[in-house]
Image (tube, coloured by chain):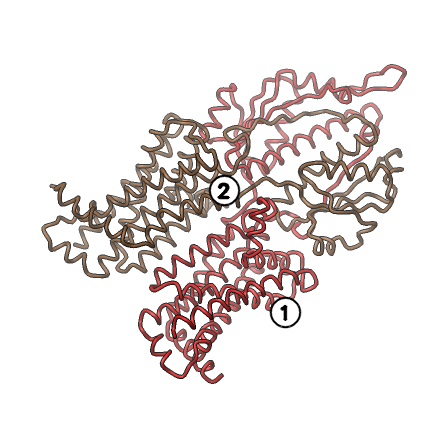
Chain colours: A red, B brown
Amino acid sequence: MNGFRTIVWKEFAQLKRDKTSLRLMIMIPMVQMLLLGYALTTEVKNTPVAVLNHDGGSRSRELIEAVAHNPLFNFKGSAASETDLRAGLDRGDIKIGLIIPADFSRVLERATRLDPGPGGTPSLGALNGEGASVQLWVDGQDANSANVARGYLGAILNQWAMGDLRHRLEGYGMRLDQVLPVSTGASVLFNPSLKSTWYMIPGIAVILVTMVTALLTGFSIVREKEAGTLEQLMVTPLKPIHVVVGKAVPFLIIGIAELMLALNFARFWFGVPFRGTYIALLAFTAAYMLSSLGIGILTSTLARTQQQALFIIWFFLLFFLLLSGFFLPVENMPHWVQNVTLGNPVRWFMHVLREMFLKGSGFTELWREGLAMLAIGFGVFGLSLVKFSRQVS
Amino acid sequence: MMSRSRLLTIARKELRHIFRDWQTLVVVLVMPVMMMFLYGYALNADAKDIPCLIEDPSPSPETRAIASKIDASSLFSVEGSVFTADDPAELFRLYQVRVIFRFPPDFARDLHRPGGAHVQALIDGSDPNMGAIIRNAADPILLGATLDVVGMRQPHVLDVRTLILYNPEQRSALFFVPGLMAVILLMISALLTSVAIAREKELGTMGQLLVSPLRPLEIIVGKILPYLLLAAVDGFLVLAVGRLAFGVHIAGNPWFLAACSLVYIFTALSIGLLISTIAKRQQHAMFMALGATMMPTVILSGFIFPVLSMPLPLRILSHIIPATYFLEIVRGIILKGVGFAELWKPLAALAGEGLLLTAIAIRKFKVKL
């Protein structure tokens, strides 16, 4: 136990002397947080849209107004012809083209007109398949953005059309629910304005903590290997487990401090709510760090130089990050890939942090994830310990 | 002024270095293929079978029929139904559903009363992207299902028909293959080149080379040539895997794509050269190449995250990054099948940036000597 304390003390003394590394440890995450926080957005905004209007009536002009005034879209004006619209899409100047057919106003007029039907029941044109139609040409290169933008525009157009219908029906002294007995409303919980930063920033914190703990632990051992001081340590009465755990503890503390820094940055700079409890946060973080520290130690047994260590950890991280649900939800992936992600500690911690931040979940809801992280963590840490001991003896 | 045999000597020496170092080879050959497969399977934007819950305080044949119609849609999958949801937040926390459809206590009767029935969709917005998709889709699906069940026709006031261009099946492979080309070519041209030159500096062998009869320009060009070759090989590799494994076909002219890739590689090499004139040690070169080149490229070029949605300062910053232009060109050629007429602007920007950076690098290099 005494040897273990000596190593911890030695690591801290070394860290304290290395002012540049300390500064980097604080600065780099802050800068990354700031840059990534703004850049990693899955929101779809400023979509450039142009319109090709074949119709001369007033209804099409009202429809265009509704699109042009919507803040989610960047209205680029009218195209002269279909070729012109297509050229705009080809050049990438616009992402969506809206085409209004020649008889739009006339058909819409008929669709919202109440005809005295047979037998005295008035009938609405729209119920007899007489609706107007518009066409969207969507740049589908980025399937995700295209989906969301198309959904938004479709909703705007439908809302306008329903408003138009209600207005017309009121003119006849009727209510909308007479033709449409059900109405829907939507309310969004946890993130009412659907801000991307609220979702991405807890994820970025996971990446930062992983990088800092895995990289620094790996580097710190490989550096001693390179300098030959690891051999010197091993001829002292210290056991390998003392060295490994003694080296891991300072980085565990630094990792937790880093996470707290990221957390406060998220709250006070980006305004992301933290609805969980600190105790749960600390417990889950400690469980996760078994894995990230373990990866660092495992890497140090594989790498001979710091450069190799960097490459190996980079490789690990890329793999883990892509399969963590950071960009796109895990449930969209094929089943066998979803099964692969079960062994990915980053996936679990990503989920835990997001649930904790936004939904305020705690031990009651997340104990399964916690157990999964503990299992993976003990596996990785144990393996790295065995490999390390075998290597130095 | 440049002798071909001396140039080839340097190039051959560098190639031998590359093939002796398994790490570089892994980075060059294995990583791109792995990345392709990872992206191919991990990045799937298609949301389907979103888990949802029904809150139905007065179960009736109508509500059950509507629930089964919602379940039958490809977007939603009904996980179950509850009698009351007093604390919907707790349900979201415990059951990992994304949306709760709340039927009113007297839904079946409300349908035939003035005012109609009102169904509320409670959406878990923590994943904003998913939230937006659900919010846009919930209303039409619910409306269609209800009208179907009560035997009414849906008023078709406005029909929005969508034609998806360039990637009609919405396959993510078509999106990430061009992006991976940009990232991998940059990695080889900027990262590996700058580290290779910095290594010679660090080991002091650069000084030895300089006192040999070799001219400085021959050393640099000779060192760069093998990486140009590697970059070209990797470009082919990405396209070949993209075609064989993911069915990505080049809609435009492949020769034009090759020419544009050369322009991009030239620009990326000039970045590598510039880094190597500044960095004295491998470590510095690596951090500069990763931090100042790779990171911004992955984040700001539109590789994954849409540039248009970023705040203005970042959108301006993205126009300094060569990969932004290259991505536009590669996506233009592979997906849209367009050519020089549509793409001359980004191509000119790319070439201009390459020339500028090379001029600065050569100047700095000469000053150092």
Q: Residue furthest left?
A: B213
Tell me if mark 1 has few (under 14), some (14-19) or many (20+) residues whose alpha carbon lies within 10 angstroms of its own: few
Look at the image and tell me whether residue A270 can be seen.
Answer: no
Question: Residue A279 — which label?
Answer: 1
Residue lying at 44% horizontally and 34% vertically, measured from the top left: B243
User: Residue A146: x, y in percent?
Assistant: 56, 35
Tell me if mark 2 has few (under 14), some (14-19) or many (20+) residues whose alpha carbon lies within 10 angstroms of its own: many
* For residue B62, side relative to residue B338 (left or right): right
Whether labels 1 and 2 belong to a single chain: the reply is: no
Question: Residue B40 — which label?
Answer: 2
Amino acid of disc 1: Ile
* For residue B87, side relative to residue A262 (left or right): right
User: Residue A362: x, y in percent?
Assistant: 67, 63
**In front of the other: B29 or B283:** B29
Answer above or below: position of A10 versus B131.
below
Chain under disc 2: B
Answer above or below: position of B208 versus B102.
below
User: Residue B323: x, y in percent?
Assistant: 39, 42
Quarter of the rendering occupied by the C terminus of chain B = bottom left
Label 2 sits on a secondary structure element that is helix
Quadrant in the picture for residue B3: top left
Amino acid of disc 2: Gly
Label 1 sits on a secondary structure element that is helix
* For residue B215, side relative to residue A383 (left or right): left
